Amino acid sequence: MTGGQSGLVDWEQANRDHLMAELALLRLLLTESGRNDGAEHRRAEAEQAEIAARHRLPADSALDRLAHGFGLTGFERSLLLLTAGPELAAAFAAELRTACGSPWPSFGIALALLPGAHWSATTPDAPLRRWSLLRLLDTSSPINSPLTVDERVLHHLTGAGYLDSELATIARPLPVRTQVPAPLHRAAESVAHAWSHHRAVLLSGPQAANLQLVAAAAGAAHGRQVLLVSVDDLPTDATARRRTTRLIERETVLSGHAWALSLDGADPAERAAVPRAIADLDVPLAVLCDEDTAVSSDAFVRVPVDRLSAADRVALLRSALRRAGAPEQHAEEAAGTFDLTAADAEEAARDTALGTPLWQACRERARPSLSGLAQVLRPAARWSDLVVPEAQAAQLRALVASVRHRTTVLDDWGFADRTAAEPGATALFVGPSGTGKSFAAQVVAGELGLDLVQVDLSQVTSKYIGETQKNLRRVFAAAEDSAAVLLFDEADALFGRRSEVHDSHDRYANLETAYLLQRLERFRGLAVLTTNARSALDRAFTRRLRTVVNFPHPDPAMREALWRRAFPPGTPVDGLDPAELAHLDLAGGEIASVALAAAYLAAADRGPVAHHHVVTAARWELAKSGRSAVAKRVAG
C-alpha cells in the first residue's frame, strides 16, 4: 500500500470515528434529558472521546468541510447530524421514539433539543434546503415534518465520496496529462490564476482536446479534478437547469471538483444563454468554445489557446515517442504535417511502438469525423494515373511541394515572418466537366499521403440562419486538425458573386460568402476548389488563390493516353485500339464511364470487352449531353 493510499485509509477511519463521537454527544441529549445520576460524568466522557477522535484526524472531517463550505451555523450543523442519526446508528431511531415519540427527526424536535436553535434554519433559502442537504417530507408542516438527509450528503459524511448520480449522467472527468506543452502550460497557469480570484474563464481555441487538457492541468494545479459537461446535456427548462447548477455548486463543496462547460456543437441560442446560466455559479469554471464562437459577458476572464507551433508539435511528438519506447525517425516531418493534439500525439506514439509506421499512426489519429457534412476519402491515385498536359502537371507538382516543404520554407527559412497570412494554400482547378479536376485533387492528396475531405454542399448549406457557417466551421477545423486536403467540387455554388441586397435573404447570403472567404484565408492546409464557370466566382475570392490550374478538354493524344489507362489490368479486352478510340470526342470522365459501361456489356455477353461494346457505350455517353454521332472510323 502506498503512502497516499495509507493516508486516505487513515483519514476515512478517523473521519468515521469522529462522526460517531459527535453523534454520541447528540444521543446523550436524548437519553440524559432527565439529568439522572451520572449524566454529567457520561457527558464529560463523551466530550473527551470527541476531542480525542478529532486529534486523530489527519485533516478536517467531512462534516467540518461541509459545514464550512456551506456556511452552516452551529445549530444547522447539529440539525444535519441529528437528521442523519437514524441512518448512522441503528439504535438512534429507538432512542428518538422513547424521548420524543417519533422515530424520525423533525425541526420541532431540533428546536426543543439542540442549543443555539433559530427558526430560519429550514427556510427554502437557508443552506440546508438551498443546497438540498436535507429535505422536509411534508412542506405543509415545516415544524412537524420528518426530516431526511440527502443520500449523497450522507455518504459524504461517512467519507464514502462519489459523484452525485444526477451529475454522473452528464459529466465525465478529464484526464490529467503528465506532459503538457509549454504554451498550453502557460494557458493553464492563467486559468488557475483566475480561479484563485474566483473568476470564471472562457477558454477559446480551434482544438477541443487541447482546451480540455488546459482545463485539466489548471485543475491539477489547484488540487482539483475537472469534470466536463456539454451545454447540450444541460436541461433546457430554466427551473431544471437551475437545479443542475445548484447540484454542481454542491458537488464542488463536497468533492472539490472544478468544471469545464463545452459549447461544442451548441446553437447560438445556447451560447447566448451561457452567461445567464452561470452568472451566479460560484465554482472554478472554464467555458470551452472554438475561436469563432462569440460569448459576450464580463463574467469571464478570456484565455485564448492557439494551435501549437510546428516546433512545439515536434517537441511534443518526440517526447511522446521516447516515453513509448518508439523510434523518433520522421517525427519532424509528421509533426510538421499533422496538427496533433497532445492526447493524439501520445496515442500515435503508442501505436508506433506497437509497429505502426509513424506517418500512418498520425494520420489515423488525426482523421476527421464529419458525420455527413463531407466524405473522407483515402486516395490511392498516383501521378501515373493522371493524364494532363505537362504544364498543368508541373503546376500540380509545385502545389504538392508547397505543402510538403511548408515547414522548411516558412519556419526554417523565415518566410512566415514576412506575411501575416496563414501558411495554407488554395488552388482553383478550372475546366469543363470530366477533364480530371477532382481526380487531380485525389492524386495530389495521395502523393502527400493525406486524406481528401470532399465537401457535400447539399449537407453544408442550410436555409436556417447561421447553420451554414456552423457547418463550414466544423469542416475547416476538422481538415486543419487532420492536415487533410479540402475539396470543394463545383465551388461556384458556395463562392459565387455577392449580390445586391434586396431583402434579408440576400444579406445573410452575402454574410455567408464573406465568412467563407475569411475562413478560407485563415485555413492552414490545402484547399482545392473546382469549377467549370470561373466567371461566376466572387472576385474577392480570386485574390486568395495561390494556384490556378486550367484543365483543357483532352486532345487526341491525351485521349489515346486516357484509353490506354481506361481498363484495369485484370479486364479481358479483345482488339481495342486506343489510337482509334481517341477519335471519340470524349473527356476523361466520359471515357471512364464508357469503359465501365462497356465492361458490363462484355460481362453480360460472357466474353472480353470488344470494339462494339465500346461503341455502344460511347453512343449512350454522348447522348447524355445531346450528342449522338460517333466518328465513322470508330463506328466502323
Image (tube, grey):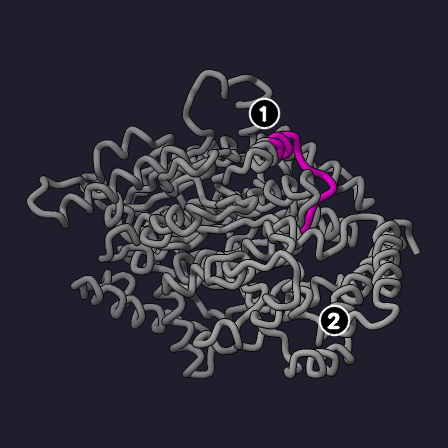
Residue 188 shown in magenta? yes
Q: Position of residue 233 (x, y in %)?
A: 47, 62
Disc 2 to disc 1, C-alpha distance: 86 Å
Q: Secondary structure at mark 2?
A: loop
Q: Earlier in the sequence, mark 2 or mark 1?
A: 2
Q: Residue at x 52, y 34 (%)?
A: 306
Which amino acid is tagged 2?
Answer: Ser
Q: Residue furthest right?
A: 1
Residue 113, image x and y in percent?
Answer: 66, 67
What range is drawn magenta here? 175-189
Pick whichever, 327 or 565, lies toward us.
327
580 sits to left or right of 338: left
Vertical placement of residue 161 versus 487, above or below: below
Residue 587 visible in this rendered orientation of the protein = no
Residue receiving disc 2: 33
Query: What x and y, as percent, mark residue 169?
Result: 56, 67
Camera-nearest label, 2 or 1: 2
Q: Is residue 517 above or below residue 102?
A: above
Q: Which residue is mark 1?
A: 408
Q: Quadrant of residue 23?
A: bottom right
Residue at 89% in and 61% down: 45
